[in-house]
Amino acid sequence: MILATFNIAPDEKTVAVWKMLLQDLNDDDFTRAVIHLCRTKPKVPPNVVAAIREEIENDNFSAEEAWQKVLQQISSTGIYGDPKFDDPAIAHAVKALGWKDICNTPNREMGVTRAHFYRTYQACRKRAVLLETHKVIETNLALKKLIDGIGRRMIPVKNST
């Protein structure tokens, strides 16, 4: 779909790299991201893989939606309860800020806590994507070999004559 929309013809190695870097995505997320890219971008993104991953990341909970889940847990669980979150990034952000500290925030300062949560949550989301990408590269020997080969070709070799 991307190839037809943007009228591009990448070589076989490029397609192989894309396939390996995107293999961890589920079909629904991948399809939604590609469709959105094709509908919203006037030209092919410089890094197709990063663009697809960014679309998927943006399609997940926004920081505002994540904050709503935190507020729901404050109401239902309370300060001494054990909050449960479906999204690990929310759980990590809450842990970083401290559950009791969030619950004890006075109403007049809740905006500051919310802003800290937004930044922390977004950082946790980006870190999760990076860790997943590194895991895919490390566990896929063909991809690792291909990437290592690309890096070596870019380093100029000096003749020792």
Image (cartoon, rainbow, N blue to C red):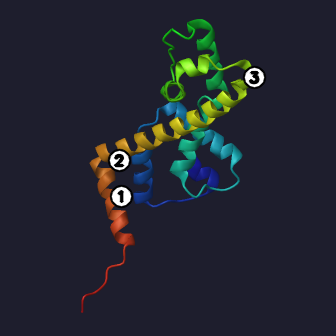
Element class at badge 2? helix
Element class at badge 3? helix
Front position in the image: 74 or 12: 74
First reached walking from the N terminus: tag 3 or tag 1: 3
**Residue 2 image offset from top left, x and y in percent:** 58, 49
Residue wearing tag 2: 137
Residue count near mark 3 (Cα–Cα under 10 Å), binned few <14, some 14–19, many ≥20: few
Q: In the rendered image, which quarter is residue 104 located in?
A: top right
First reached walking from the N terminus: tag 1 or tag 2: 2
**Residue 127 image offset from top left, x and y in percent:** 48, 40
Element class at badge 1? helix
Front position in the image: 135 or 96: 96
Residue wearing tag 3: 108
- Mark 2–mark 3 CB contact (< 8 Å): no
Q: What residue is shown at x 69% (from left), y 31% (from top)?
A: 112
Residue wearing tag 1: 147
Residue count near mark 2 (Cα–Cα under 10 Å), binned few <14, some 14–19, many ≥20: some
Q: What residue is shown at x 50% (from left), y 20% (from top)?
A: 86
Tell me the distance, in whole angstroms, between the alpha carbons under discs 1 and 2: 9 Å
**Residue 158 image offset from top left, x and y in percent:** 31, 84
Q: As displayed, is residue 21 above or below residue 96? A: below
Q: Quadrant of the C terminus?
A: bottom left
Looking at the rendered structure, the kind of residue marked 1 is: Ile
- Mark 1–mark 2 CB contact (< 8 Å): yes
Q: What residue is shown at x 29% (from left), y 43% (from top)?
A: 139
